[in-house]
Image (tube, coloured by chain):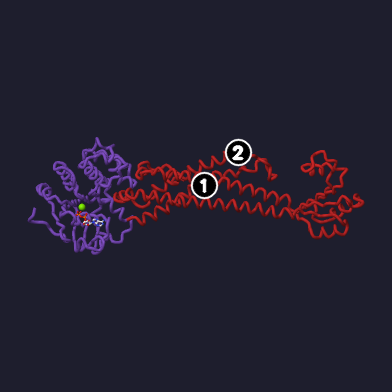
Chain colours: A red, B purple
Amino acid sequence: MNRVWAFIMGDPLADRAVPPTGILARLTIFVAAAMAFLAIFALVLSLTAGRVASNWADDLAQSATLRLPADLDQTNEALRAAVNVLQTTTGVASARVLEPDEQRALLAPWFGPDMPVEELPIPQLISILPDEDGYDIAGLRARLQAEVPGAVLDDHGAWREPLLDAANRLRLLGWAILAIIGAVMAAMITTAAHASLAANAQVIRVLRLVGARDVYIAGAFVRRFTLRAALGAAIGAVLAIGLLQLLPQVDVTGVTETPFGFHGIEWLWVLAIPAVAAIVAFVATRRAAFRRLREQT
Amino acid sequence: MRAVVIESRRRFGHYSSVSKGKIVIELDNVSYGYGGTPLFSGVSLKLVPGSFHFLTGPSGAGKTTLLRLCYADLRAHAGQVRLFGQDAAHWSRDEVALARRRIGVVHQDCQFLDHLSIAENIALPLTVANRLTEAQNNLAELLSWVSLVPQAGQFPPELSGGERQRAALARAVIMSPDVVIADEPTGNVDWEMSQRLLALLVELNRMGKTILIATHDLAMIRSMKADVNARVLRLKGGQLMQAGAEL
Ligand SMILES: Nc1ncnc2c1ncn2[C@@H]1O[C@H](COP(=O)(O)OP(=O)(O)O)[C@@H](O)[C@H]1O
Ligand SMILES: [Mg+2]
């Protein structure tokens, strides 16, 4: 920790030994800021997709709906038979017949709130929740087939799986974007460091003539680029967070009012961005510097 | 200044560990040339501690090149260069750096960092050795030794030739080196200034430093003969020899 602090504080004269190159300083800060800005959104994409995926995976796991067609004769009898089947199936925690109000609520988004549900031939729905062990869908479907012909068991799987798949892919895509952002930043900073080293060839020569070791010369460059990258990344992250607050917040995940953002411990990711930028710059500049110093006589 | 150098000798004693009589810089049958054509060959040279040498020869004879071999800026194409008793042929860059802290060099073109003040340039060898805290005491006294106190805050391009040479000399001795090598230290200064610079080098020699000065100015060497027991070496036609009659 002391060494990190000493690195950040630096040695004023040692720092001045290598003159700053204005355009490269600005380029480094700009690149770090832009990359951090993009990284925040890639993180939001990943975290949101992750939330959506785990939410669906948890809540919808094995939950199902049994639908009794409206034109089924003797609906009440069929209803009783269906509930009977469900209650005697191992793995089913509850089977609940939806009230007309609930069915109306489900239809409201499509037909408006004044829909006279009672007068329409709409199917009766039964919501099924599994217990911890779950039930055998194929077996249940076979029993229903025999005892309540015409009933349709919808296990949500048909539409859940591709959505879950998509959410997971989006999350992976977010991580891949983050990796690309890191690689681009490393490449840009390496290039800037090489340009700075080349521009300071004569300074390096003088430092060597007075007995400077490679670690000392490299350190002057590494420290500068590392701090610039951290500063730029912090600026970019702050701008991105600010913009994020302006996004319309809608409940797409069903988990939270503010799906596009960071919650609780996720803020650590935001703090990690300048730190990661600094580490990337440190490694990139150090490699560039030692390579250059090896080549320059 | 005498007090300064003696004081810093004591303080940096571990860096000045050349034992009496041990050869500081030794060239043994050394050859060097640029681009395939040999500039000189079979050059041998021994600098014992406390000795004073002039290296003369016409312009282009290779004086600067020979000096660069002496502070490991170039590597001999043949023969051996021993600095402080060690063969420098296969030194790592770190070993070269550490050796340079024991060899003070006044370069022909001074080699300052133009964006640093004169005081910062003089302190640079201590800065890069992470011994800047030790500089504060020595720096003030060194500045007055070379009469540059008023110029301490100025930048190298603002100084006259003589002032630059004196600043370069101060930088060369701030680490209290065992050897001081000066390449044409009187190159573009007037007669009076060249006498002042040489007097400073003679003073350093009296304190026990080994001195090697390259110059093409024979009149200057003659003027020094009374003050110091100097050997004069002559580089000409690719050979190094003792100078004699022409002085
Ligand atoms: N870096 C170099 N590359 C090629 N030729 C050089 C280089 N340095 C010096 N020379 C040539 O070597 C010869 C000797 O140069 P130098 O050692 O500077 O001589 P002096 O110091 O005696 O004037 C000159 O002809 C010079 O042009
Ligand atoms: Mg020369």
Q: Which mark is residue A75?
A: none
Q: What's the residue at 55%, 50% (across, down)? A: A178
Judging depth in this view, the residue of A195 and B121 nearest the camera is: A195
- Residue at image position (77%, 52%) is A63
Q: Nearer the viewer, residue A297 or A184?
A: A184
Which sits earlier in the primary sequence, circle 2 or circle 1? 1
**Is residue B24 in view?**
no
Q: Amino acid at mark 2?
A: Gln
Image quarter of residue A243: top right
Q: Is residue B232 left or right of residue B171?
A: left
Residue A35 tag number: 1
Q: Quadrant of the N terminus of chain B?
A: top left
Which secondary structure lies at badge 1?
helix
Residue B85 picture location, percent across and down: 25, 59
Q: Where is B153 relative to A143, above or below?
A: above
- Is residue A288 among what the camera can see? yes
Residue A213's spot in the image, x, y percent? 34, 52
Numbered disc total: 2
**Residue occupied by mark 2:** A245
Ligand 1 placement by image quarter? bottom left
Residue at 52% in and 42% down:
A236
Residue ranking furthest to the left: B245
Tag 1: amino acid:
Met
